[in-house]
Image (tube, grey):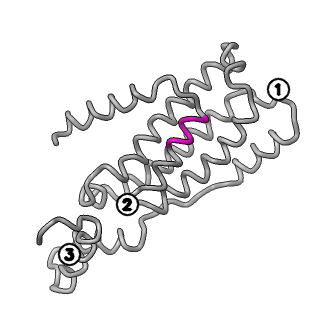
C-alpha cells in the first residue's frame, strides 16, 4: 500500500470518528489498545492514562459544556487529539510488524506527544471554574501526576536490533524468524 493510500485511509478513519465525544473516543482507544499486536505496553499505558481522563470527563456534562464557546473549542480540540490518538493506537494492530519495528522510536515519540497534547487541552478547558467539586480537582491532580514512560518492548527492541545489524548471525536470523512467525503464523519463510 502506498503512503498516499495509507494517508487517505487515515483521513477516512478520522471522518468515521467525527461526532463521537471524548468519552466515546477514549473507549474506542482503550478497546484498540487491548488488541494491539506491537507496542503493546505503550498502548496499554496510554489507555490507562486515558481512562483517568475518561473517568473525569464522565463526571461532566459534556453536551452542556459544548454550549459555551470558551469550553466548546478546547473540547473539540481535545476530541481531535483523541481521534489522532485512536489512529496511533489502531496502527499498532493494523500496520505490518516490520513497519512498526522500523518506525519503533518514532511511534514511541508519537505516544509521548499525544499524551502531552491531550493533557494540555485538559488544562485549557476551564473545568475547575465550571465544576467546582473536590472529586474533579482530585482527578485532575491524579492525571497530572500520571506521567508514563514510553519505550520499545524487549521483544520489539531485540527484533529491531537484528534488523539494524549490518552483519546478522544465524542466531539473529532465528530470532527474527521466531518473532515474525508468532506475529504472522501463515507467512512462509
Tag 1 near tag 2, CB within 8 Å: no
Q: Residues within 10 Å of mark 2 (few under 14, many from 20)?
A: many
Q: Nearer the viewer, mark 3 or mark 1?
A: 3
C-alpha distance separating marks 1 and 2 = 41 Å
C-alpha distance separating marks 3 and 2 = 16 Å
Highlighted range, magenta: 23-28
| Secondary structure found at label 2 | loop
Work out whether 27 lies above or below 131.
below
Q: Residue at x 39, y 52 (%)?
A: 107
Between discs 1 and 2, the one toward the N terminus: 2
Most common SS among magenta residues: helix
Q: Residues within 10 Å of mark 1 (few under 14, many from 20)?
A: few
Work out whether 123 lies above or below 94.
above
Whether residue 123 is in magenta: the answer is: no
Q: Nearer the viewer, mark 1 or mark 2?
A: 2
C-alpha distance separating marks 3 and 1 = 56 Å
Q: Residue furthest toward the left? A: 189
Task: Report the front residue among 31 and 162.
Answer: 31
| Secondary structure found at label 3 | helix
- Residue under label 1, please give it: 129
- Residue under label 2, please give it: 38
Task: Please indicate whether residue 18 sits to the left or right of residue 157 in the image.
Answer: right
Please provide percent x and percent y for residue 125: 69, 28
Amino acid at each position: 500500500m502506498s503512503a498516499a493510500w495509507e494517508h487517505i485511509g487515515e483521513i477516512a478513519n478520522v471522518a468515521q470518528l467525527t461526532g463521537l465525544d471524548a468519552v466515546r473516543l477514549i473507549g474506542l482507544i482503550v478497546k484498540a489498545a487491548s488488541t494491539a499486536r506491537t507496542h503493546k505496553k505503550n498502548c496499554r499505558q496510554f489507555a490507562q492514562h486515558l481512562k483517568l481522563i475518561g473517568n473525569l470527563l464522565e463526571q461532566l456534562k459534556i453536551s452542556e459544556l459544548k454550549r459555551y464557546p470558551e469550553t466548546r473549542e478546547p473540547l473539540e480540540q481535545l476530541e481531535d487529539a483523541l481521534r489522532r490518538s485512536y489512529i496511533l493506537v489502531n496502527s499498532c494492530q493494523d500496520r505490518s510488524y516490520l513497519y512498526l519495528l522500523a518506525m519503533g522510536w518514532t511511534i514511541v515519540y508519537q505516544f509521548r506527544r499525544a499524551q502531552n497534547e491531550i493533557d494540555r487541552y485538559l488544562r485549557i478547558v476551564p473545568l475547575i471554574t465550571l465544576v467546582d467539586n473536590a472529586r474533579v480537582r482530585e482527578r485532575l491532580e491524579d492525571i497530572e501526576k500520571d506521567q508514563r514512560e514510553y519505550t520499545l518492548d524487549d521483544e520489539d527492541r531485540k527484533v529491531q536490533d537484528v534488523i539494524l545489524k549490518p552483519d546478522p548471525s544465524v542466531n539473529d536470523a532465528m530470532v527474527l524468524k521466531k518473532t515474525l512467525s508468532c506475529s504472522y503464523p501463515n507467512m512462509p519463510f
